[in-house]
Image (cartoon, coloured by chain):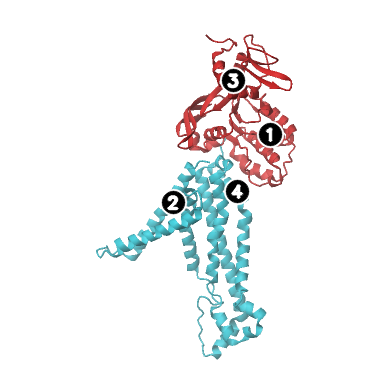
Amino acid sequence: MQHISPFNRLQLCLREFWELNYKKILSIPLVILIFFLLFLLWPGNYLYTLIFNPKMAESPGYFLAAMESGYGRARVIILCLIPIFLILVSNSYLKSLKTSVSYAVRPFSNLDRVFCLWIYALFIIGLSIFSVYLYDIITVSVFKSTYYNKTLILLEEQGNLYPKFQFGSFFMPLDAKIYFAVSGIILLLLPFYHLAYFLFQKNSLLWSVLLYILIIVGSIYIYVKFIINYYFIIPFHPVITSTIYGVMVCIVLALFVASFKEKLKEREV
Amino acid sequence: MIRIDNLSFHYKKDITIFDNISTSILPGHIYGLLGLNGIGKTTLLKLICGLLFPKGGSINVNDFTPSEREVSFLSDVYFVTDEVDLPNWSIANLITIYGPLYPKFDKRYFNEILSAFQVDNRENLNDLSYGQRKKVNIAFALATNASLLLMDEPTNGLDIPSKTQFRKIIAKHISDDKTIIISTHQIRDIHHLIDHLLILQKHHLILDESIYELSQKIKFQQGNFEDALYTEASLNGNINILTNPNNEDSSFDIELFFNAIHENPTFLQTLKTINTHGHAAH
């Protein structure tokens, strides 16, 4: 009896996930595009005003204000859709793992399931960030090629010869740091969500969020009460301190992932 | 071989499902698992394939502990559930993705069974009726050539010709290295297939005997008999269960036999006192 290799099994596990969710995954760039367009055409935004109130759009005051800060923080809000995508894609899979007999007796190992969920989570995060990045770059490029010179001329007329465009301007793409921060936060929450799905029978999302908040509040309390208030705390070099925190976070995350794998093993269907 | 030793199980502590069940299930046989609704037939099947964990005792399937759900164990077991929860893919996709997980999977055999069931293998599972989906699941289960096949109400939803096909296919499928356990209420659909009976009642396995052994003890006959162990009136007159001292051949009526056990509490005890030559032991 020739058993399939673990690598091929993982491939099949990934294929299974893909076949179950490819429509949702492929629609992510489209949904992000729709949100981008919605944002750009939102009442009060420059393009909306240009279409429905061209006179106002041409007034220098409004035009400059729109170009300098009209892009706003909406792109960050769009980035916040990523956890929703992750939940929408993995929710049905997690539910099947938890309740479906045919999924539970399928000859995949628990590690295959964990790897599969993580690989797709990383893929979805990557795809979403790439989509936001792409649409952001396109929007900025279009605005730069269309309105940049006009903006510079208007600013020169106002005496601003060396304008600096800040975050929020139509001429400034999102900073890479924001992408990293959002990805980091999602990756911190994800193992907890996976585990919580198996810890709580009902309303897993609500309970997991509440428990996560409780953990954060507890951590802050411990940090403030026992670390910040202790005057004799050993003053480590900032790099060492951040490394220690990083390692601690990694340990906690690894514990979550390991607990999730154990919960998969212990589940009864 | 499946060895069940002192198996106890409950969902809630105060509601016992199984209390110290022990049996050995041998390869090469088709076992019929019978019992009233809610008695724990599906639960027993789930315990055997590792979906539930025993609260007491142990289960051993071909030297594996099912609750550990090792990949090698799962790739040699298939559970056909009453409700078909296959994904909404094309049949071709189902074979491509799940087929390689079972080392003995035979695609040609799968297509043969599907054509016997008159299901087009180019179809999408989403477009099939409940009965057709069930046929696909049964075809897949058989094509895995798994050593242990667990079937929960396999004929539910099948049309009449398909039930006949099902019987033929199962009869052809069983071999010395395979075990099939069928849990069903539609016993007339499969009663010629079953060669061993497992009957659950009140948290216990009250009967674990082959049809051959039972046929040596009892026979089924129409008419009026004063010494009948059990009698049931039918449109064609009374049908009786009688002792079989002369080892006469009769078609074993599992439904009547089950009714006898269920309706007449002393029937089973009387049966136990009869030896394999149909004589009452003294």
Residue at mark 4 to residue at mark 3: CA–CA distance: 44 Å
Q: How far from the left and from the top, in percent, is residue B250?
A: 68, 16
For residue B27, say whether it is visible. Answer: no
Q: Which residue is mark 1?
A: B109
Colour chosen for chain A: cyan
Q: Amino acid at mark 1?
A: Tyr
Residue at 63%, 14% (x, y): give it: B228
Among the chains, which one is red? B
Q: How far from the left and from the top, in percent, is residue A34?
A: 63, 67
Residue at mark 1 to residue at mark 4: CA–CA distance: 24 Å
Q: Are marks 4 and 2 on the same chain?
A: yes
Q: Amino acid at mark 3?
A: Ser
Q: Which residue is mark 2?
A: A256
Nearer to us of marks 3 and 1 is 3
Q: Which residue is mark 4?
A: A15
Q: Dot 1: what SS?
A: helix
Circle 4 Cα neighbour tier, 10 Å, few/some/many (<14 / 14–19 / ≥20) = some
Residue at mark 1 to residue at mark 2: CA–CA distance: 44 Å
Q: How far from the left and from the top, in percent, is residue B219?
A: 65, 15
Which quarter of the rendering shows the N terminus of chain A?
top right
